Amino acid sequence: MSPLRGWLCLAATVVLEMVATLALKASHGFTVLAPSVVSVAGYAATTVALAFALKVVPVSVAYVIWTGAGTAGVALLAAVLFADRLSPAAWVGVALVVVGVMLINARKREEPGAAEEHAE
């Protein structure tokens, strides 16, 4: 798998996990069928996409990006879609997660060939 495809799989992992989590909220504890199905399928697809991403992306980097970007994305979308409210301190925390993900990505860009070492 090419490094680009690995990173695209990681991006898909983030998006799928966000969709699954938001659908889980909309399922009202698995009492509404359509979002329940979307949630279960989304989490299954997330696992598959992550497995492909890990062929190229180091697990330490992939996990931080997946969880960090997913957390920030869900927080933002839940505020819009479900009127979830976070305190100002919580929003600062979300911003710090985003900055952390950016710093991890910057570190990996400074190490040419690092992704190729993990590709088989």
Image (tube, rainbow, N blue to C red):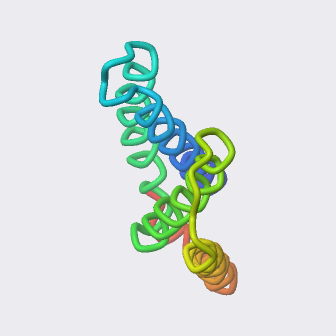
Please determine whether, in this image, residue 92 is positioned above or below residue 74.
below
Please determine whether, in this image, residue 67 is positioned above or below residue 19.
below
Residue at 43% across, 54% down: 55
Q: Where is residue 119 in the image (x, y as percent from the top left)?
A: 48, 60
| Apparent side of residue 119 relative to residue 48 in the rendered image (left or right) | right
Q: Which of 27 and 71 is in front in this view?
A: 27
Residue at 62% across, 46% down: 83
Q: Which of 114 and 109 is in front in this view?
A: 109
Q: Where is residue 54 in the image (x, y as percent from the top left)?
A: 42, 56
Residue farthest toward the top in the current orientation of the protein: 33
| Apparent side of residue 76 relative to residue 56 in the rendered image (left or right) | right
Q: Where is residue 15 in the image (x, y as percent from the top left)?
A: 58, 43
Count of residue discs: 0
Please determine whether, in this image, residue 67 is positioned above or below residue 74.
below
Task: Report whether residue 15 is seen.
Answer: yes
Residue at 57% across, 64% down: 86
Residue at 46% across, 62% down: 67
Q: Where is residue 77 in the image (x, y as percent from the top left)?
A: 64, 47
| Apparent side of residue 102 relative to residue 28 in the rendered image (left or right) | right
Q: Nearer the viewer, residue 108 or 95?
A: 95
Position of the C terminus, as image quadrant, is bottom left
| Apparent side of residue 56 relative to residue 72 in the rendered image (left or right) | left
Q: Which of 17 and 94 is in front in this view?
A: 94
Splitting the image into 4 quarters, where does residue 91 fall? bottom right
Task: Report whether residue 1 is seen.
Answer: no
